[in-house]
């Protein structure tokens, strides 16, 4: 018992951990990154306890400074800070509720139906085949005139060679 099994004893110098130069560089970097990530995750798990302790120390320190040592107006200062915080919360809730009531049910917040090609043709003063072509194209150029009318200007897209040479 306690003796190595068949195949002979394992030499300690063949272990990769003791000879890290035998590891590929990418594997060493991957393990270093994984180790750093594990330490960060482990530290992250302690944050709630650290926060609780810091909160408790801060609460006790605030009580001592404001109430026991009576700097300023004592507990009244603490109540004023809490009241201001609650007022800010109530103001934010009231404003968001107002916006929800005012804008929450507007039709523009819903998905708009796809534009009808015939209606688009009439609005832009083009023939229906042109409206279909415009609907299928990735880019169109519209002109907005001073009288309020809109028109489609047929413009060819630059070729790929011109775009690449411009870059």
Image: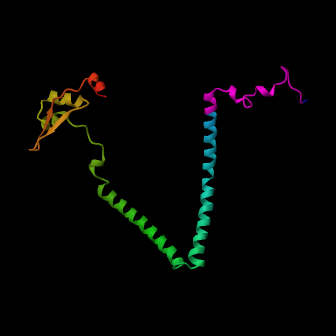
Q: Is residue 31 above or below residue 42?
A: above
Residue at image coords 28%, 27%: 166
Can you name the residue that lies furthest to the top here? 7
Query: Does 12 appear in magenta?
Result: yes
- Image quadrant of residue 18? top right
Closer-to-camera residue (77/5):
77
Closer-to-camera residue (88/133):
88
Query: Does 28 appear in magenta?
Result: yes
Question: Would you say 80 lies left or right of 151 here?
Answer: right
Residue 20: x %, y % from top left: 70, 30
- Image quadrant of residue 94? bottom left
Magenta span dominant secondary structure: loop
The span picked out in magenta is 2-29
Q: Is residue 161 above or below residue 92?
A: above
Question: Would you say 142 lies left or right of 57 here?
Answer: left
Residue at image coords 12%, 30%: 127
Residue at image coords 29%, 24%: 165
């Amino acid at each position: 018992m306690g003796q190595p099994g068949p195949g002979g004893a394992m030499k300690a110098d063949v272990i990769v951990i003791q000879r890290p130069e035998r590891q590929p560089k990418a594997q060493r970097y991957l393990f270093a990154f994984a180790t750093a990530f594990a330490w960060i995750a482990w530290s992250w798990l302690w944050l709630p306890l650290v926060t609780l302790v810091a909160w408790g120390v801060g609460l006790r320190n605030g009580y001592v400074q404001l109430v026991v040592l009576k700097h300023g107006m004592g507990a009244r200062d603490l109540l004023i800070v809490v009241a201001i915080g609650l007022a800010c919360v109530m103001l934010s809730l009231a404003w968001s509720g107002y916006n929800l009531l005012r804008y929450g049910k507007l039709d523009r917040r819903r998905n708009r139906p796809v534009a009808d090609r015939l209606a688009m043709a009439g609005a832009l003063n083009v023939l229906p085949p042109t409206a279909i072509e415009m609907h299928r194209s990735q880019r169109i150029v519209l002109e907005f005139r001073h009288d309020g009318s809109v028109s489609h200007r047929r413009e060819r897209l630059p070729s790929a060679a011109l775009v690449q040479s411009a870059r």
